[in-house]
Image: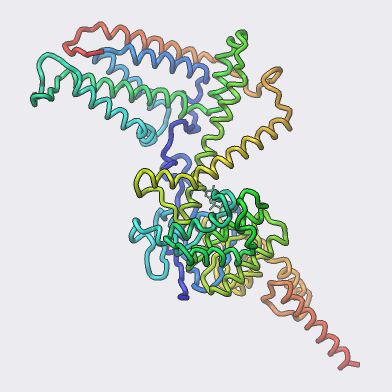
Amino acid sequence: MLKDITLGQFFPGNSPLHKMDPRMKIIISAIFIVAIFFAKNIFSFALLILFSLILTTLSGIKHSVILKGLKPIVFIVVFTAIINIFWTKGETPLINFGIIKIYPEGIYTAAFMIIRVVSLVVGTSLLLSYTTSPIALTDALERLMNPLKKLKVPVHEFAMMMTIALRFIPTLIEETEKIMNAQKARGADFESGNLLNRLKALVPILIPLFISAFRRADELAVAMECRCYHGGDGRTKMKILRFSVFDFVWLFVMLIFSVSVFCLNYIPTTIKLSF
Amino acid sequence: MKLTDIRLENVSYIYSPNTPFQKEALENINITFKGGKLTGIIGHTGSGKSTLAQLLNGLLKPTSGKVYLGDTDIWEKPKEINKIRYKVGLVFQYPEYQLFEETVYEDIAYGPKNMGVSGDNLNRTVSEAADFVGLTPDLLKKSPFELSGGEKRRVALAGVIAMEPEVLVLDEPAAGLDPRGRTEILERIRNYQKQKNNTIILISHSMEDISEYADEIAVLKNSKVLCSGTVDTVFRNAELIRSNGLAIPKITEIMLELKHRGFPVSDGIYTTSDAHKEIIRLINSYKKNGENNA
Ligand SMILES: Nc1ncnc2c1ncn2[C@@H]1O[C@H](COP(=O)(O)OP(=O)(O)OP(=O)(O)O)[C@@H](O)[C@H]1O
Ligand SMILES: [Mg+2]
C-alpha cells in the first residue's frame, strides 16, 4: 500500500530526459506549467496531450508506472470534474431534470480540466521526479537560487534541508512499513473498525516512528559534525553542472511549444469554455 | 499441546514485481518445518531468510505457491489472516523498534489484548512471558525506553510469546548482542521450546548457534533451499556447505581434521561439549592401549 506511492520516485535510466541538465528541467517545467494554464481551446489542449505523450515516450518510463503515479490524484480529478459538469451554465441544456441541468459547456470544461491536471502531473513528474535523482534536483535548485544569496537568503541551508528531507522519505516509508508489519504480527488491525478505532490503531506506529526519526536526526547531526560540516561556504562540488547544446535545444523546443499553445488559442472554435 | 507442522509448497516471492526494482527474493521453496522441533534457518545476508519468515505468518503473500499451517492453506480465507498471525508468532530482526507503550507490562500485553485476552488471563500470560525471557517483575513497571538494548529485545520477544503462538518464528534474535547476551537469550528460547513443546523456527547467521540449539537445519542460498534435514544429515554434507561459502561449526572442522589425520573420532560432532567427551574418550582409549601394550 505504501509502496504504491511513486510520487517523488526516481527511475534510473539513460533517456534524453535523464540526460538533460536538472536546471534546464526546472526551467522547462516552469514554462510547461505556464503553457498549460494558457491553453484555452481544443487545439491547444490537443497540443498539450501530444507533448505529454512525446515526453512519456522519450523518458522510457513504463506507462503502467505513470498511471500508478496518477492514482493519488484520481479523487481530486473526478471530484472537480463532477462539480464542473453540474455547475457550469450554458445556453441549451443537454439533459434537463428540472433542478439538474447539464450543459455541453460543462462537459467540455470538465474534460479540459482533466487534461490540464493530468498533463500537469505527468509532465512535471516525468521531468522532475521520474528522471531526476533528488540529489541532482536540489543541487539544481541551489544553483538556480544562487543569486538570492546576495539578499542574505540562506540558499545552501534550504537546499541541504531539502536534500535531507528527500533523502529520508524512502527511509521513513520503509521504516513505517517495517513497524506496521511488526505490529500486524502482534495482531494490530489497521483496516477495520470505525474512524476512532482506526486512529487509535495508528498510535503503535506513530510512536516508534517518531522515536526513530528523532534518533536518526540526532545521529545524522553528529555524523555531519564529525565530518566537519560547516555550511556551504567554500564547499566544492564533485559534479559540476554544465549546460550542453542539447539543453538549449530542449529550451528552444519548449519555447516553440508554448508559443504554439498561445497561438492556437486564437483559432476560432464553436466550443465556449467558462475559464 | 498439538504439534503443528508448517509447510511451504513451491513458494516464490518477488518484491516490487513489474518495476525496475523487481527482485526475486525466494524461488520455488519446498520445505516442511516439523511440529515440536526447533528448526534453524541459516544463509548469507540477502539469501531471503527474513522474507521466508514473513511468508510463514502471512505478512507477505507468496507470489506463487502455498503455505500450509497444519492442513490449512493460510491464504484460504484472506479476511481471517489475523487468526494465522495469532497462531504463528513472528519476532522481527532487531525488534526493539516496535515498542511503544508506556510500560513494559502494557507493551507485552498489546498482542494478547488484540486477541481479546483480558483480566486474569492477560495477567497470567504477560507474567509468564516475562518470566520466560527473564524479565524481573520490577522491570514490568518501567518505560520500555529506559531499558538497555538487550532488555528491549527481551520485551519484544515476550510481546510475541505472550500471544501463546503454536509456531514461533524468530528472526536473528541474538543479532547485535554480546556473547553472554546471545547464549542467555538462545538458552531461554530453547527452554521455552522444551516446556511448551511447540514449533520454533530460528533464523541465524551463526552455524555455532544453530548447531548448538536446533534439531533440524535448513540452509538457504541465493533464494533457494540448498539443503535441509536433521543437524546430522546436513553437516554430513560438510563439503557442500563449505563449497557454498558457508562455515560449518569450528569444532566440527577440528574433528574432521583430526579424523583426516587418522584419529578414530566419530562423525557428527557439532558442539564443544560433545567434542570434549569424544576427545576424553579418545585419550582414555589410548591410555588403555598403552597399558595393554606395556
Ligand atoms: N521490502 C523490500 N523491497 C525490495 N526488496 C527487498 C525488500 N526486502 C528485502 N528485499 C530483497 O530481497 C532479498 C532477500 O532479503 P531478506 O531480507 O529476506 O534477506 P535476509 O536473508 O534476511 O538477509 P539478512 O541476513 O541481511 O537479514 C534481498 O536481496 C533484499 O535486497
Ligand atoms: Mg534478515
Viewer-proximal residue among A155 and A12: A155
Tally the marks: 0
Image height of A28 relative to B201, above or below: above
- Coordinates of residue A15 in the picture (x, y in percent): 46, 27
What residue appears at the point 55 percent right and 35 percent down from the top-left corner? A168
- Coordinates of residue B138 in the picture (x, y in percent): 64, 59
Q: Quadrant of residue B86?
A: bottom left
- Coordinates of residue B60 in the picture (x, y in percent): 44, 53
Residue B263, visible in the rendered structure: yes
Viewer-proximal residue among B259 and A91: A91
Give the colouring mode of the picture: rainbow
What residue appears at the point 33 percent right and 11 percent down from the top-left corner? A38
Image height of B256 relative to A122, above or below: below
- Coordinates of residue A215 in the picture (x, y in percent): 62, 40
| Horizontal side of residue A239 vs B123, given as left or right | right
Viewer-proximal residue among A52 and A8: A8
Quarter in which the C terminus of chain B is drawn = bottom right
Q: Quadrant of residue B219?
A: bottom right
Image height of B33 relative to B60, above or below: below
| Horizontal side of residue A99 vs B153, given as left or right | left
Residue B165, visible in the rendered structure: no
Q: Which residue appears farthest toward the right when viewing the image?
A: B294
Viewer-proximal residue among A212 and B5: A212
| Horizontal side of residue B38 vs A251, given as left or right | right
